[in-house]
Image: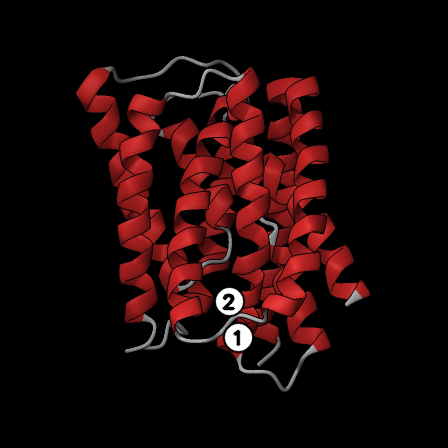
Amino acid sequence: MLFVTLASLLAGFIDSIVGGGGLVLTPALFAVFPQAPPATLLGTNKGASVWGTAIATVQYNRRVQLRWQTIGPAAAVCFVAALGGAWLVTVISPQYLRKALPLVLLGVLAYTLAKKDLGRHHVPRFVGQHETLAACAIGLGIGFYDGFFGPGTGSFFVFLLVRLLGYDFLNASAGAKLLNTASNLAALLLFTLKGHVWWHFVAAMAVANVLGSLAGTHLALKHGTGFVRSVFIVVVSALILKTGYDAFLRG
């Protein structure tokens, strides 16, 4: 309990800034409970992490002008898409994505490093309905991915909001939290209906996740876009190493 609760604290901290908390919490759960059904561990992970992303959304909304008219509908689309992805994973295996994921993340990292000004200035590319449709497309694609497979979801949300919608990293992180909360809720709903959540563990892990989220959000809001961009680069680099090891070396 102590180990997974501390892991949940760190996951909430990372997740609140740029996403990627699953990089910490999911391996921790699998290490502590190697004999448990994977679906139960994934459901328990969602049960803890959804609280951190929800609290981070509230905190960001107090300091950043969250574009509700755009991100709100996208979150609804994301919720439905994540349910669809979670259902599909009960029918077919997502294992073929394991080898592709580190390569996609490597492309995201290379592009971010090459574009020095990427995400440093908040200059939305679309207005009105066009922005909403673009955000909904992101919610549809990444929401489905989160339900079906999941690793790196928060980072993908941030990157696409920056690259496609023209947000800076701070505003993108704020929007990503709402989208990630929607996809986490959808997955949690499905796992709960299937009986795959250890609620007695979730209670303590959720509290720790929220505390980590509050700390991470405070730092992001205090230090701004440059800080979030730096953390994004570090987290994506770690995701590349972790997913690359799982796909090519772990066997």
Q: Residue furthest left?
A: 129
Residue plotted at (44% across, 30% down): 175
Residue plotted at (56% across, 47% down): 51
Asked if residue 217 is positioned above or below residue 250 in the image, the reply reads above
Q: Residue 139 placed where, x, y %?
A: 31, 42
Q: Residue furthest bottom?
A: 35
Residue contact between numbered discs 1 and 2, judged by CB atoms under 8 Å:
yes
Q: Is residue 137 left or right of residue 195?
A: left
Please tell me in which quadrant of the rendered image residue 100 appears.
bottom left
Q: Residue 125 placed where, x, y %?
A: 30, 17
Q: Is residue 116 left or right of residue 96?
A: right
Question: Which residue in the protein does label 2 denote?
Answer: 43
Going by the numbered disc 1, the residue's amino acid type is Thr
Which of the pair 83/24 is nearer the observer?
Answer: 83
Q: Residue 173 placed where, x, y %?
A: 51, 31
Going by the numbered disc 2, the residue's amino acid type is Gly
Q: Is residue 129 left or right of residue 162?
A: left
Question: Which residue in the protein does label 1 denote?
Answer: 40
> Can residue 119 be seen by looking at this rendering?
no
Residue plotted at (31% across, 62% down): 85
Which of the pair 171/112 is nearer the observer?
Answer: 171
Q: Secondary structure at mark 2?
A: helix
